[in-house]
Image (spheres, grey):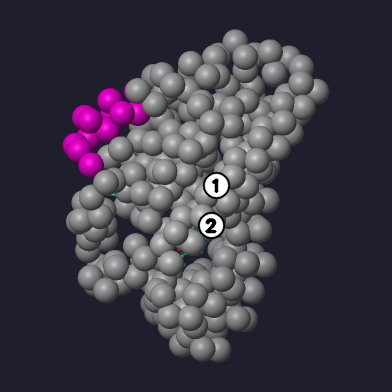
Amino acid sequence: MLLIGLTGSIATGKSTVSSILSSPPYNLPIIDADLLARKVVEPGTPGYRAIVSHFGPTTPDLLLPAGPDLPENGPDGKGRPLNRPALGRRVFGQDEAVKKDRAKLNSIVHPAVRREMFYAVLRAYLRGERAVVLDVPLLFESQLDRYCGMVMVVAVKDPQVQMARLRARDPHLSEEDARNRVKSQGDVRDKARRAERRDRGKGLVVWNDGGREELTEEVRRAWEEVERWSPRWWGWVLLGCPPAAVGLALWGVLMNFRINKAWAAEEGERAKAKL
Ligand SMILES: CC(C)(COP(=O)(O)OP(=O)(O)OC[C@H]1O[C@@H](n2cnc3c(N)ncnc32)[C@H](O)[C@@H]1O)[C@@H](O)C(=O)NCCC(=O)NCCS
Ligand SMILES: Nc1ncnc2c1ncn2[C@@H]1O[C@H](COP(=O)(O)OP(=O)(O)OP(=O)(O)O)[C@@H](O)[C@H]1O
């Protein structure tokens, strides 16, 4: 089974691309990290308890306010849900204190998301899926790209397109909040370069500066490339021979490790050249 890591930056079009890939003619199963990241912090979960205990004392509006529709202890007595915009204000931005808070939140949420993801991938393999899409905004940052046979980055060349789409989709965000969110994720053009730097058949960029029809065409072109490097019959061979599938997966991880090492060395050289 081919693991396709789908990434990009905020509002570059990942969800739009994953909804295209989950519909005919592709019909691919999608494992959405943002959805899992919500699930693992629902009231009553260990993630929720860790967040409330760490951020609660210094964030008065961390939970949604109690009212006629929301009892003090939440609808099922497990606590009131998190007030996500309030937590977002604590963790999105460039100040050192904010970065520290973001690292803390990530250290609570990411391991739980990885666990859920592993089970979802296993279920997809047992169902005999030919490929599965991991929709992960922070794919490179959380090093999940190591496990992907193919990395697909949805990117825009023009930062203003990204900001305009974000403001149109999330009108409740102030301009400053929107800017902070964009800056909290790496530059999408760097992610695109990183995908292009992977070996052939292992990395692709879906450019999304144009309209929706152009995007659909870009996805069709990207899928052709996937099929060229990972034909359907190959998936059946691996399904019929689990040891070969495990061996190939390990080989893939090793190759990705090599690719990432080469990328880190090149980045180091680039940083030195800038000084
Ligand atoms: C801070 C939270 C509560 C804000 O929730 P809210 O509903 O307002 O925003 P949402 O989750 O839709 O995220 C908005 C955008 O920010 C991105 N983003 C989310 N968390 C992070 C992060 N830790 N670092 C950088 N970007 C992030 C999302 O991918 C998305 O593109 C939430 O984003 C969160 O719990 N983040 C930590 C978990 C995480 O890293 N999720 C990303 C996928 S694993
Ligand atoms: N080609 C396009 N033309 C016009 N609008 C688009 C296009 N692609 C995406 N959009 C719109 O831009 C907004 C952001 O797209 P989308 O939600 O897919 O991004 P995302 O990368 O998943 O964002 P996030 O990481 O914040 O979840 C949405 O409102 C979407 O409808």
- In the image, what residue occupies the spot 60% across and 40% down? 259
Crowd around label 2: few <14 · some 14–19 · many ≥20 (10 Å): few
Prevailing secondary structure of the magenta residues: helix
- In the image, what residue occupies the spot 59% across and 73% down? 104
- In the image, what residue occupies the spot 59% across and 45% down? 262
Where 103 sits versus 195, above or below?
Answer: below
The residue that disc 1 covers is 263
Q: Is residue 154 left or right of residue 236?
A: left
The residue that disc 2 covers is 268
Q: Is residue 186 left or right of residue 73?
A: left
Q: Position of residue 125 (x, y in %)?
A: 66, 28
Q: Position of residue 194 (x, y in %)?
A: 47, 44
Q: Is mark 1 within 8 Å of ligand 1?
A: no
Give the residue type at disc 2: Gly
* Residue 214 belongs to the span the image colors magenta: yes
The quarter of the image holding the C terminus is: bottom left
Q: Is residue 256 among the parts visible in the rendering?
A: yes
Q: Position of residue 216 (x, y in %)?
A: 28, 29
Q: Please provide the residue range marked out in magenta.
A: 209-220
Q: Nearer the viewer, mark 2 or mark 1?
A: 2
Q: Position of residue 270 (x, y in %)?
A: 46, 55
* Residue 260 belongs to the span the image colors magenta: no
Toward which corner of the image does residue 14 lie, by quadrant? top left
Crowd around label 1: few <14 · some 14–19 · many ≥20 (10 Å): some
Q: How much space separates mark 2 and mark 1, taking CA atoms? A: 9 Å
Name of the residue lying farthest toward the top: 233
Toward which corner of the image does residue 48 lie, by quadrant? bottom right
Q: Is mark 2 within 8 Å of ligand 1?
A: no
